Image (cartoon, rainbow, N blue to C red):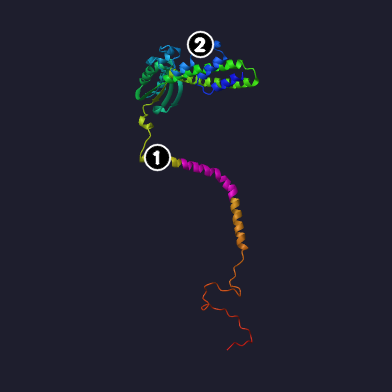
């Protein structure tokens, strides 16, 4: 059984490698594996055609007709109408009649310059008729339609899903043969990893199927006073001046807000601290000693002083003493 566990771990290195799975299936016994699953992995990965491709025939994946391809349609349209609310109801009704639904609804109502932006999801085969119906609600100003062919990605996902399902089945069969706790834990971890990979692939397939089955149309309905130029970004000196003034006002608003938040703290803490600092400074001035006006006796003259022109202070005459001749 340990050999089976080692073989399973080796084959689990890559989710797209089907050769190891076939070896694991052979080790577990080919008798209990359906023939369709056993032969689908490598053939699907090579060309996505399965057994039909091995027989030389063209399977469903080899069909290159337009109606058999997976195409994602996305479109956006801008229409100017007289009544935005009425046009929005008409657009919603068009999507509902086509078998779709409204995926998003944003409106701004203000008399004649009202704007409504709707996101419609409609079946792919009803995409162009719905677009034309939306254009007929008023005067069309802009239309953009994009398509993306995801046929190859869809075929690749189908092949990988088939292969991954076979890998999961092989891991389950080996798990049934586990005869020790260590083998059971290893096989359970490997099976959980393979099942998680399979779930991820199936989620991608469902996402692609949703995009191809339902197309997305973004319709913008504007009132008669809203022009396309109003929504375009302006450039030039005046536009820069206007933008700079707006930023200046916003900055001043932020500055005043911060000042208003800090001012109470300044009044509560700043005024007492300032008063204490002023009193301590005044006290230091009072106790500061006065500088000596006369240099003490015996102090040598500063370097570079002119001794010839300096006046020597005479001591006061002593009473009764004679002056020298």
Is 3 on the left or on the right of 142, as rendered?
right
Q: Is residue 263 above or below residue 57?
A: below
Q: Which residue is depicted at the point 36% across and 40% down? A: 238
Count neighbours of disc 1 (C-alpha within 10 A) and say few if under 14, some if 14 to 19, many if 20 or more.
few
Compare residues 246 and 102 and report the one nearer the observer: 102
- Which image quarter holds the N terminus? top right
Residue 242, labelled with which disc?
1
Range drawn in magenta: 250-270
Residue 35, labelled with which disc?
2
> Residue pushed farthest bottom?
325
Compare residues 6 and 58 and report the one nearer the observer: 6
> Residue pushed farthest front?
3
As measured in the structure, the alpha-carbon distance from the residue carrying label 1 to the one carrying label 2 is 73 Å
Give x and y (percent) for residue 16.
49, 21
Q: Secondary structure at mark 1?
A: helix
Q: Which residue is depicted at the point 38% across and 31% down? A: 231
Give x and y (percent) for residue 195.
55, 20
Q: Is residue 323 above or below residue 146?
A: below
Q: Which residue is depicted at the point 37% across and 18% down? A: 128
């Amino acid at each position: 059984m340990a050999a089976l566990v080692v073989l399973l771990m080796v084959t689990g290195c890559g989710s797209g490698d089907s050769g190891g799975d076939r070896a694991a299936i052979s080790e577990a016994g080919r008798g209990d594996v359906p023939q369709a699953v056993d032969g689908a992995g490598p053939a699907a990965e090579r060309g996505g055609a399965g057994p039909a491709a091995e027989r030389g025939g063209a399977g469903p994946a080899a069909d290159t007709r337009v109606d058999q391809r997976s195409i994602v349609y996305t479109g956006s349209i801008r229409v100017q109408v007289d009544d935005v609310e009425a046009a929005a109801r008409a657009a919603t009704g068009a999507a509902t009649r086509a078998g779709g639904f409204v995926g998003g609804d944003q409106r701004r109502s203000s008399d004649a310059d009202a704007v409504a932006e709707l996101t419609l999801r409609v079946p792919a085969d009803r995409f162009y008729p719905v677009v034309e119906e939306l254009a007929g609600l008023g005067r069309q100003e802009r239309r953009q339609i994009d398509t993306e062919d995801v046929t190859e990605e869809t075929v690749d996902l189908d092949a990988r899903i088939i292969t991954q399902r076979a890998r999961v089945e092989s891991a389950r069969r080996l798990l049934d043969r586990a005869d020790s706790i260590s083998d059971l834990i290893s096989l359970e971890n490997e099976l959980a990893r393979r099942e998680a990979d399979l779930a991820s692939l199936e989620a991608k397939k469902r996402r692609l199927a949703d995009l191809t089955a339902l197309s997305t149309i973004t319709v913008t309905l504007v009132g008669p006073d809203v022009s396309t130029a109003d929504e375009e970004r302006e450039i030039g000196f005046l536009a820069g001046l206007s933008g700079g003034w707006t930023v200046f006002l916003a900055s001043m608003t932020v500055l005043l807000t911060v000042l208003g938040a800090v001012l109470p703290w300044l009044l509560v803490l700043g005024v007492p601290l300032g008063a204490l600092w002023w009193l301590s400074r005044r006290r230091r001035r009072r106790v500061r000693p006065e500088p000596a006006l006369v240099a003490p006796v015996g102090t040598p003259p500063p370097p570079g002083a002119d001794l010839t022109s300096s006046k020597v202070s005479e001591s006061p005459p002593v009473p009764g003493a004679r002056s020298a001749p």
